[in-house]
Image: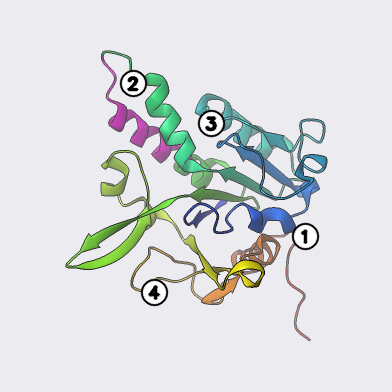
């Protein structure tokens, strides 16, 4: 099974930019938001000619693409899907006019099957990042954060319970002094989680580092593995 990692946070908090450090020769971007990547000159590294970038939110294209990468592209170590929210929104908007269409039921089934595909049918040494937006909710007078989904079906299914890794973005400071980090464990207000001992509780939002540490923790052979301590 591939390793599924959700990157959760509000827009503009470093989810996509954290991938700038990844090697384009070993990374494939699925741009479901269809807005391009979030750093300058990204098109020189990620494009159709390099066969490492596609702009689509269509699951009928994404699913076979993931299977192709898993089976035919052994050089690819990381797939980044940006974002799962655009996939769910487009499922609803494209099909909601069908008279017999239960949009929330179908959307939930599609996303559930997408995540299940990653966990059960993709090769073991592949890491799949799925970016997701979050929303606040109130419980007993306290404000908490969770993955934002259209409708409530996926929320009720507790999709977070099926993740070993759900990293939450965190931004400190202002202007040029802003620092972008990932929170890797539940702090009482989020759904953050990670395999015990795999990642520090808080770390720089740098997917090259994250990938290396996950490869090491999961026993995956890959080029991002951190150096062995002597």
Disc 2 marks which residue? 96
Label 1 secondary element: loop
Dot placed on the residue nearer the N-terminal end, 3 or 4: 3
- At x 46%, y 61%, the residue is 164
Badge 2: few (under 14), some or many (20 or more) residues near its Cα, within 10 Å? some
Give me the disc on residue 223.
Answer: 1
Give 175 or 209, whichever is nearer the viewer: 175
How far apart, in angstroms, are the residues tagged by discs 3 and 4?
32 Å
Magenta stretch contains residue 93: no
How far apart, in angstroms, are the residues tagged by discs 2 and 3?
16 Å
Disc 4 marks which residue? 187
Where 205 sits versus 45, above or below? below
Choose mark 1 or mark 4, whichever is in front. Answer: 4
- At x 67%, y 68%, the residue is 176
Give me the disc on residue 129.
Answer: none
How far apart, in angstroms, are the residues tagged by discs 2 and 1?
44 Å
């Amino acid at each position: 099974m591939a390793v599924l990692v959700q990157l959760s946070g509000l827009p503009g908090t470093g989810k996509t930019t954290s991938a700038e450090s990844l090697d384009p020769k070993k990374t494939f971007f699925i741009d479901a938001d269809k807005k391009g990547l979030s750093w300058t000159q990204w098109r020189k590294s990620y494009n159709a000619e390099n066969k490492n970038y596609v702009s689509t939110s269509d699951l009928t294209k994404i699913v076979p693409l993931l299977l192709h990468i898993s089976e035919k592209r052994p050089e690819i170590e990381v797939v980044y899907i940006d974002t799962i929210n655009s996939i769910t929104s487009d499922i609803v908007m494209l099909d909601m006019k069908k008279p017999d269409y239960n949009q929330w039921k179908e959307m939930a089934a599609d996303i559930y099957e997408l995540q299940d595909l990653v966990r059960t049918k993709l090769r073991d040494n592949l890491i799949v990042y799925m970016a997701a937006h979050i929303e606040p909710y109130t419980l007993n007078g306290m404000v908490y954060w969770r993955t934002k989904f259209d409708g409530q079906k996926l929320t009720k299914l507790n999709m977070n319970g099926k993740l070993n890794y759900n990293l939450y973005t965190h931004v400190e400071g202002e202007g040029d002094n802003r620092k972008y980090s990932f929170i890797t464990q539940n702090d009482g207000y989020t759904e953050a989680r990670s395999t015990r001992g795999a990642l520090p509780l808080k770390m720089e939002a740098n997917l090259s580092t994250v990938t290396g540490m996950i490869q090491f923790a999961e026993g995956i052979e890959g080029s991002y593995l951190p150096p062995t301590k002597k």
